[in-house]
Image: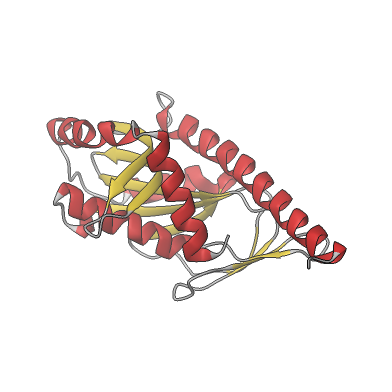
Amino acid sequence: KQTDYSRDSEHSREDILTKNERKGKELEDAVFSFISSPGNIPGYHRELRNVYVQRPDGSTTEIDLIMIHDAGIYVFECKNHAGNIYGSVGNNTWAVFYPGGEKHNPPNPIRQNAGHINALSDYLKMQRSCFYSCVVLGREACLKKVPEDDSHCFISKYQNLERKLMNQIYHSSVRLSADDIGTIYACLEPLTKVSEEVKEKHKRDIREKYGC
């Protein structure tokens, strides 16, 4: 039998998850607006959001945002957690401590995005070196202990995204022609138009895998 305390705890957890989903959407909107607005990003590029790629095992991975740029394919994972964040590359989940003491263990965004990139690499039959992982956290995130950036991945709060993205682009050579970008876009654009059934199944798979 559920106690009042357990019911209250479940409701509190559900409230946090619902709020995080809403805030996550807001962050995705902000990042997409930035990368897709004319003049913000140098070079030729095209953008996609909410791309569902099927893995070889039949499961589906959802990618928040993709920017196909002449310097490579930038894959964005957006997490709008408003709390103290701790995590490492090897953990399956990270820890977020919210004001008031509530703790949440979301999927490790670095590993999550690596999975996205592996799926894209397989789907497009392109080398992993053509992709760059961009993990973007919200303005209210406090990065207490997270991995350092490396040559193929950065972690950034939204307010630092422009600086980090520009730095990566400026230090990259041209990899893709305008024709390449158009071809890749044409391959991925249909994957943004999946059924509600596919979207719901993906959400269920995530909840079962991570318990969230």
Q: Position of residue 33 (x, y in %)?
A: 49, 30
| Relative to 6, 153 lies left or right | left
Residue 10 in sight in this render: yes
Nearer to us in this view, 167 or 33: 33
Q: Position of residue 111 (x, y in %)?
A: 41, 65
Q: Is residue 47 above or below residue 149?
A: above
Q: Is residue 39 above or below residue 156?
A: above
Q: Quadrant of residue 121?
A: bottom left
Residue beneath the point at 44% across and 56% down? 205
Q: Seen from this angle, which residue lies furthest front?
A: 1
Residue beneath the point at 78% across and 68% down? 1
Q: Seen from this angle, which residue lies furthest right?
A: 4
Residue 65 in sight in this render: no
| Relative to 211, 198 lies left or right | left
Residue beneath the point at 46% across and 34% down? 32
Nearer to us in this view, 143 or 64: 64
| Relative to 64, 152 lies left or right | left
Nearer to us in this view, 118 or 143: 118
Q: Quadrant of the C terminus?
A: bottom right
Q: Position of residue 101 (x, y in %)?
A: 80, 66
Q: Position of residue 133 (x, y in %)?
A: 37, 55
The colour mode here is: secondary structure
Residue beneath the point at 40% across and 39% down? 197
Q: Seen from this angle, which residue lies furthest bottom?
A: 90
